[in-house]
Amino acid sequence: MEITPDVFAAYLECPTKCYLRATDEPSASNTYPKWVQAQNDAYRTTETERLIAESPNNEVARSPAVENVMAAKWRLAINLVTSTRNLRTSIHAVERIPSEGRGQSAKHIPIRYHFANKLTRDEKLLLVFDALVLSGMLGRKVSMGKIIHGDDRATLKVKTSVLTGEVLKLTAKIATLLSNTSSPDLVLNRHCAECEFQARCRQKAIAKDDLSLLSGMTEKERKRLNSKGIFTVTQLSYTFRPRRRPKRLAAKPEKYHHSLKALALRQGKIHIVGSPELAIEGVPVYLDVEGLPDRDFYYLIGLRVKTAKGIVQHSLWADSAAEERRIWGDFLDVMSRIESPVLIHYGSYEKLFLRRMRERYEGPSEGSSLEKVLASPVNLLSYIFARIYFPTYGNGLKERAKFLGFEWTAKDASGAQAVVWRSEWERSRETLTKRTLIDYNAEDCEALRIVTEFVSSPSILSVGHEEQDTTSTVNVESLRLPSRLKFGNVQFQLPEFDAINKSAYWDYQRERIFVRSSDRLKGIAAKSSKTRKNNLHINNTIIWSGPTRCPKCNRRKFYKHCSSSKTVLDVKFGASGIKRWITKYLFYRYRCPKCGAVFHNSDRAWNNEKFGVHLRALSVYANIDLRMTQERVAIFLNDVLGFDLPRSATNRLKATAAAFYNDTYEGLVKKIASGNLVHVDETKVNLKTGVGYVWAFTNLEDVAYVYSPSREGGLVHSLLKNFTGVVVSDFYAAYNSLECPQQKCLIHLIRDLNDDLMGEPFNDELKEFVGEFAVLLKTIISTVDRFGLKARFLRKHRVDVDHFFKRLAKRDYQTETALKCKTRLEKNRGGLFTFLDFDGVPWNNNNAEHAIKAFALLRRDFSGIATEKGIRDYLILLSICESCKYKGVGFLDFLRSGEKNIDAFAERKRRRTRAASAPVARSDHALGAEVGRWNISKAEVARVSRGSPR
């Protein structure tokens, strides 16, 4: 079966439309596609006659024979019908440019006409289709084509070589499609409104209850549902489960649920999510605009105003583009005469109209009340979206208004049909056609009013649990079934049941009921009710020395004014244990007799802190490294060491430690950013008031966690703006714009490839492709296992990598998954094998993932309850904890030392370890000292010191 331009153009919009056109399926009476074809035919005829008139008669050939094209002398050929292989076309016109000299062939430029002022990619592909057929007939490439289009007869030159590959792939897919005896799977899309087979396809889709009936569902979502065995709208409706919306997401837009839309369709009821409230403070003005998008021309502005006297409709009509300014001025005049107007529209078309008109013509003065009204109109579609689900397949105004009982006078009324009516009026100037357009616009305004008043009525929000079976509106909260397994207060219908239930509470029974019948429980209850007395034993008392001079007048003689004390809670680490250690500091305040100043010694050991350094170290160690919650840390310190600390004390200890080590943390960040290698990864964290992201930056020795309120790449760019080393990361797009060498994590890649293989085990193309990549990577990893990450041993594999990508470029995969994997590898080629050219650069991002894992384990304790400041404190301490582990240093030892430089502490500890392990020459005196301990004779001591055998 031959592929013609009509069949090719149909495939660009829909495979089903392509098949139906190729098999001559009778079409329904849809006015718009017929009008488009008529416009194109008329434009082609007009432009053809113009070109003929501008060319000499002896240089124009009409429908020339294909056999004479090679030796032809004409300059312009009209309606050249040609074919090659299974492709056939009727080229609108061909311009022939004679050869410039001996040995050079004449150039043939195909010309295509299109009536629209704005071209899409489809018109370019159709031109390249013509050029492909023409080049097959000529036996040489056609490098250039022209599209003449629009009212101004604009000419667009197209380089055919850019799109030839895509056209060849499309024609191959069309040939495969047409070779089948059955039509492809029916999928409705956005082109259906402009298709002659719309009624046929929609009827079949409704009969099948197909998922493509739900507008807005992408092909990816549909395939994902199909993989789960969900193929119909009814099946999808049973998957909806109402979920409690977290408080941190309260400010974010609600997610759209196709399953809830399917449920609304199955039940035939409007479903409401949350408590949407449309507050219209003023006089509502319902706006609907008709225009010609291809010409950027607005010819009809409809305004419907509800006043105390009734409803007033304003229809502002423009006969031509020259009158557009006038109707805009009339629109502003109408709006200025309305007190406190509120513009309401449906969709983005009217919002774009308001913005363009203010840019194109004069608008209201800046800062005026009317200017504010025009700048902030109410988009009813945005308000309804994801909040109110109508039982309609689409989200358009017409479907929703029809559900509420509104009907348009014209049964085929639509935006596309309005374009046809306007074209007919411009041709005939009939009053009836104009009246039809004005009525259609007024009915759109009325439909908008009906939908607005419905969704803003108080009754729509008053739906309760008891009404969901009798009303046409259902609140999604009423669909949530109460669980009998969860903790919480039970709502009893009878107050007697509530009183009986409260009497069964565990603590109530222990304190009020069981104690009446058991003396033992009575004693336990009395003992547990006693509060712990905070009379801690003082282990050490220190009298702190006073100052030597008055800080104000520098006088040496002053007297004691009053005494004071400070108790510091701390712990003391021993060789085999920990004990509570309480130090009491006694000090005086002094008064200067000369200037009267009251002062004390500002140099004090406790630095206004209630807790000592070692207690802080122990608390932070338990909280960060042992991952005990702050509440459990407080319980541990109280029960084991006898303190009486509230939970807030451990939080204060964490904040104090974070402030103390902030310079250490900043040093880690700078050290990583100035190195030669950085591993980076990110993860999400739930805060008390929203969602944040934590980025982990690490090399082989240091780790730094950085908080960011968003996942955008600005943080990475600011930290690594001067970085010149290699960044190892996953395939997140934010890393791609870094101006430094990058290595993508190959573990991520092979996992994704493996998932694709698991999903399509019988895809031979994918098997071959993944198999070749696996062999290539396995060879490289074998070299890494043998020689390590040394570039002088790895560079030899560059040849294998280049050969692999050359073979890959020549492959023409037909399956979608294989093509997707090929595109992904070619796109990221520059970052897949960077480690072959650098020493010490890993081929995976496991270092960063290991760092992220440490945060993920800690995140369990505070997810959803921490503040942004609390998260930042956690990240400072976790950065130090993980850096200590990377360097082989104990986190608790570092905290106890009071040191701020991890490298200096690690080096000092290594020196002590080397000194302790070094052999020591022992003198006779030292050996003699052991005699008393082991009862060794002096002669034996002398023999050992000489090294003599026994």
Image (cartoon, helix red, strand yellow):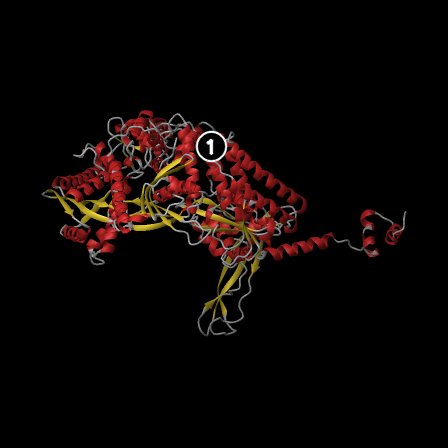
Kindly tell me whether residue 558 is visible in this rendering.
yes
Which of 183 and 353 lies nearest the eye of the viewer?
Answer: 183
Residue 539 appears at what percent x and percent y?
58, 52
In the picture shown, does residue 227 fall above or below 686?
above
Image quarter hosting the N terminus: top left
Outermost residue, left side = 309
Which of 359 and 528 lies nearest the eye of the viewer?
Answer: 359
Residue 163 appears at what percent x and percent y?
41, 44
Residue linked to disc 1: 522
Circle 1 crowding by C-alpha within 10 Å: few under 14, some 14–19, many from 20:
some
Total marks drawn? 1
Residue 147 appears at what percent x and percent y?
33, 47
Q: SS class of the residue under badge 1? A: helix
In the picture shown, does residue 766 fall above or below 548?
above
* Left or right of residue 870: residue 92: left
Which of 360 and 641 lies nearest the eye of the viewer?
Answer: 360
**Disc 1 residue type?**
Lys
Which residue is pictured at 47% across the width and 48% down the height?
694
In the picture shown, does residue 311 fall above or below 357?
above
Residue 135 appears at what percent x and percent y?
42, 43
In the picture shown, does residue 280 fall above or below 757?
below
* Left or right of residue 456: residue 248: right
Kindly tell me whether residue 892 is visible in this rendering.
no
